[in-house]
Amino acid sequence: MHAQNVDIAPGSTSTVSIIVGVDPGLESTGYGVIEAGGGSLRCLTYGVIVTQSNQPSAARLRHIFDTLQQVISIYQPQYCAVETIYFAKNVTSALCVAQARGVVLLAMAQQHISVAEYAPNAIKKAITGIAQAEKRQVQHLVKILLNLKDIPHPDHAADALAVAVTHVHCCMSSNYAVGSTRSRGAYVTLYKKGKR
């Protein structure tokens, strides 16, 4: 597990929802855990699960599964948001992503975590209001939405946080309308993060 920021303990109130976003990939699977409640969003952790290319596929998938289980155990998310597979010219690459996606879904199913899937264009539109937005635009707004000091890195981790925020916007925004504003069509909630 490779986290890029200092982890924050999840909140204890029953009104808080915890969402884990996942950007699946065999070589690198991004994950990001956010907390939504009281009209605010908070980043709890994010990072990437990196596998070694010289290892058998089964071992690499097991590593992804085991690490996700650790994340689930620590943060106890109620919801999972996953970026869907888009059609790619490289069939081998698409199959590898599909394998990783299957492991993600299994990890969530074993813990009875509700899973929602979002296409890349839907994520861009939810975050920026523009379905064809550039990746850098999405990353910049994720940084603002989650009150992060820097743009999340690597890209897979940023993508995972983006899909988690998308889930709040698409499925939970009515519950977190207090204190929110709209920016270029996106669900934007600004808040002051507590001490890490």
Image (cartoon, rainbow, N blue to C red):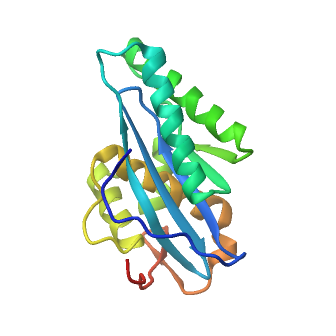
Which quarter shows the C terminus? bottom left
Task: Give the answer, above or below, for where 119 lies relative to 183.
Answer: above
Q: Is residue 75 above or below residue 173?
A: above
Q: Position of residue 37 (x, y in %)?
A: 61, 76
Please identify the quarter of the rendering in which residue 54 is found.
Answer: top left
Depth order, front residue of 130/89: 89
Q: Residue at coordinates 27% horizontally, 52% vertically from top-left?
A: 153
Q: Residue at x 55, y 87 (%)?
A: 179
Report whether residue 53 is seen. yes
Q: Name the residue rendered at 49%, 44% in the picture.
A: 22
The image shows a total of numbered marks equal to 0
76 sits left or right of 196 in the view? right
User: How far across and down, in percent of the image, does residue 118 sit?
Assistant: 56, 44
Quadrant location, the N terminus: top left
Res. 74 image quadrant: bottom right
* In this view, 140 is above or below 190: above
Question: Which of 90/74 is in front?
Answer: 74
Q: Is residue 95 visible?
A: no
Q: With 133 as the anchor, is 101 left or right in this view?
A: right
Which residue occupies the foreground of this view, 7 or 24? 7
**In this rendering, is residue 63 above or below 144?**
above
Q: Residue at x 70, y 47 (%)?
A: 113
Residue 64, position as x, y percentages in the image: 47, 33
Q: Position of residue 86 (x, y in %)?
A: 47, 30
